[in-house]
Image (cartoon, helix red, strand yellow):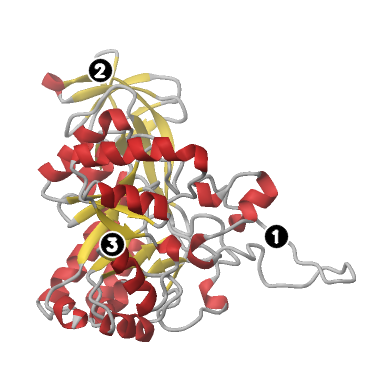
Amino acid sequence: MGNQRRLCSIPELVAGVRNLAALSACKDYADAVYFSLDRFSLRARAQEIKRDNLDAFVEAVKGCGLRAYMAVNTVIYPEDLPDVNDVIDAASRAGVDAIIAWDPAVICAALDRDLRVHISTQANVSNGRAAEFYETLGASRVVLSRELNMRQITEIGQHTSMELEVFVHGAMCQAVSGRCYLSAYLLGKSGNCGDCAQPCRWQWTLHSEDGAEVELGGKYLLSAKDLCMIEHLSELIDTGVCAFKVEGRLRNASYTAVVAGCYREALNACRDDSYTYEQAHELKKRLELEYNRGFSTGFYFGVPGPEGMGYESDMNASPVHRQAVGVVVNYFPRQNAASVRLLEQGLTVGDRIIIEGSTTYLEQEVESLISDGKAISEAERGQDVGLGVRDRVRKNDRVFKVKRLSTS
């Protein structure tokens, strides 16, 4: 029953965003965005959206024609309950379309205020009966466990009328449904409270019981590759899910723009029944140029083996890296120019740059540089330089150089 209803359309594309810049970057591609406040979020470092600017942020989301989903998905302790109620009140006043939650206290608080509830992947929903349980509570959607394969997802959809959402791209956790205790144990920073220090991305050495070092092929023994399903969207659509989620509430706006754009292009082609292997391959090549830890298909085709782990690579496997350059000191709209203080390194005409802030995202080539009223071809670290810009930038925006590293 539920499966027939969901199969009638292309799944909703839900992108993670951290601020207005990321929203602007994906507004032409996503159908909805998910975000969090500066508390009760599994991305505690996402601090730019707060209660005092939540109304304006949600208004901006709606102004882009998108739906706004707010994550309130950490462990909730007794002393947190008054603040949780205040946060849900603020979400209700702002017109948030759904609360992403798994703690019953948050679920009840949202339902008491007639807000839709999407059950977080933290709940590890892995079967149809579990989905139906949350439906009896009043939830409208379940973000399924990341440890399910396609056959299992299809089966769940055939036995529930609940909306089902799955991840299609982004970071994977080495613990089931992200419930990791390694960071809390080693560093006192709980991943379940949004403060994970990511020790799984460290270099590790494995020792045997007798103290001998075990010879292994890599150093990053716990680091899972990122999920990428761009080559298998048609198969995933056939499972009957209603929404595809792109992880990345801490990623920069460039990442958000490229990833959302690639999946939108793929979904449009799927809608037209014109999606080809060649197009999927080209889109994956574009995705590989953004921050990633290598790609895998996660659990969709079975339990991943060594191919799902990034043993040999550090945090970023992309050949394209962003390098800090400096900061915008002033903006001159009549001249279409910005004054930039080159704090970390110099700039040369022709360099590819990104200018980014909480409300700014601009990517362009350096077309003109001015120093002491004269046009120059390059500027050195330590200078204040005039930079021609194609759109508005703001004081304190950061300037980055985009460089492709040699793979030889």
Disc 3 residue crowd, few under 14, some 14–19, many 20+, Cα 10 Å: many
Alpha carbon distance from label 3 to label 2: 63 Å
Q: Disc 1 residue type?
A: Trp
Disc 2 residue crowd, few under 14, some 14–19, many 20+, Cα 10 Å: few
Point 28% across, 56% down: residue: 117
| Residue at far right of view | 210
Camera-side residue: 218 or 13? 13
Residue 204 got which mark? 1
The answer, for residue 73, to whether it is visible in the render is yes
Disc 1 residue crowd, few under 14, some 14–19, many 20+, Cα 10 Å: some
Which residue is label 3 attached to? 139
Q: Considering the numbered disc 2 on the image, is that residue within a helix, a strand or a loop?
A: strand
Compared to residue 289, the image places residue 274 above or below, namely below
Point 17% across, 49% down: residue: 27
Camera-side residue: 53 or 343? 53
In what quadrant of the picture does the N terminus appear? bottom left
Q: Disc 3 residue type?
A: Ala
Label 2 or label 1, whichever lies nearer to me, is: 1
Q: Considering the numbered disc 3 on the image, is that residue within a helix, a strand or a loop?
A: loop
